[in-house]
Amino acid sequence: MSINIDLKADTPSQFDTDALRKQLETMGMACGQLTTENLESYIQQVNDKIPSGSVQSYGIKAPPEDLSANSEETAKSAVPSLVTAAKANWTISTSGDGYGPNLEIIQYPDHFNCLYENRDLNGFTGTIDNPPPYTGNYPNAEAIQKLFINVCTTASATVVKDVDQDSMRATLTNVIQPLANANLSNYNVSGSRAIFLVDNYNQSTKVADALGVLFVNWNLAIRDYKRKSKDGGDTHFVSLTVRAGSVLYDDPKKLCADYNWVLATFKIDRSTVPSCVP
């Protein structure tokens, strides 16, 4: 089976020293720790742990409140809005939406969980990875490094072919956000991303082997994160929780069946959401 989709090639957002420096500055790290040499070393250590996969992305999105401490949460609704968080391998052409709005609704946590829990009845083929929390005493830089690595490894583990490294690196360009209240002594921030997946896309025929979506949610807590010693070597108690899930469809009929199952199960008014036409 295959799915028709019209995509344009794009350049994924770069997980480079500038992107990393901005995130580490958010954590109040000293300038002496943010040298180009140190930043390049951090990036290389993360890159070495990112799985090498073949499934690419045609969108990387997040709730608006996950991209800025100053963003107001969107109104509660059956279809929470997502905004672009980073550039992916591909982007939707102007001629269609690539089932993106339908996949947004499928990946919403309550919807995805319900599909997964009832997979024996509805035939849902999605997977979930929910490893135990990571805890320990680490310097801030190492805690952030563990977040980057575990977001990538947990997310990619839900996809049989793993996710393209460029897509995962793009996802890391802005995962560390400042606290809404800068006076708090403990750093405790949750975030999420929705990565829209495309497998083996042929730009000439505009056909892909499969389309899907991957969600990854995390919470990073660092106790007394502003505390520093003169040499920057002090550690903090860190707790990191990461959860991910994904589903790939090689048949648009099955995608639409799952989508319509969600609408019926959650009694979502069909006039308020996009239709799904195989």
Image (cartoon, rainbow, N blue to C red):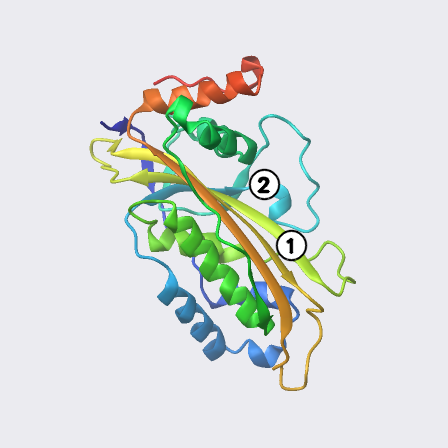
Disc 2 marks which amino acid? Pro
| Secondary structure category for the residue under label 2 | loop
Image coordinates of residue 192 in percent, x first then y, are: 55, 46
Height in image: 39 above or below 132? below
Residue 106 pos. (x, y %): 47, 30
Residue furthest front as drawn: 120
Q: Which quarter shows the C terminus?
A: top left
Say which amino acid is labelled 1: Val
- Left or right? Give the position of 259 relative to 67: left
Q: Which residue is mark 1?
A: 189
Residue 31 to residue 206: above or below: below
* 113 lies left or right of 76: left
Q: Which mark is residue 124?
A: none
Q: Is residue 145 left or right of residue 190?
A: left
The tag on residue 63 is 2
Q: Position of residue 100 (x, y in %)?
A: 43, 31
Q: Quadrant of residue 40?
A: bottom left
Q: Residue shown at 39%/19% (left/top)?
A: 257
At a point 61% along the width and 47% down the height, the residue shown is 66
Q: Quadrant of the N terminus?
A: top left
Quadrant in which residue 221 is drawn: bottom right
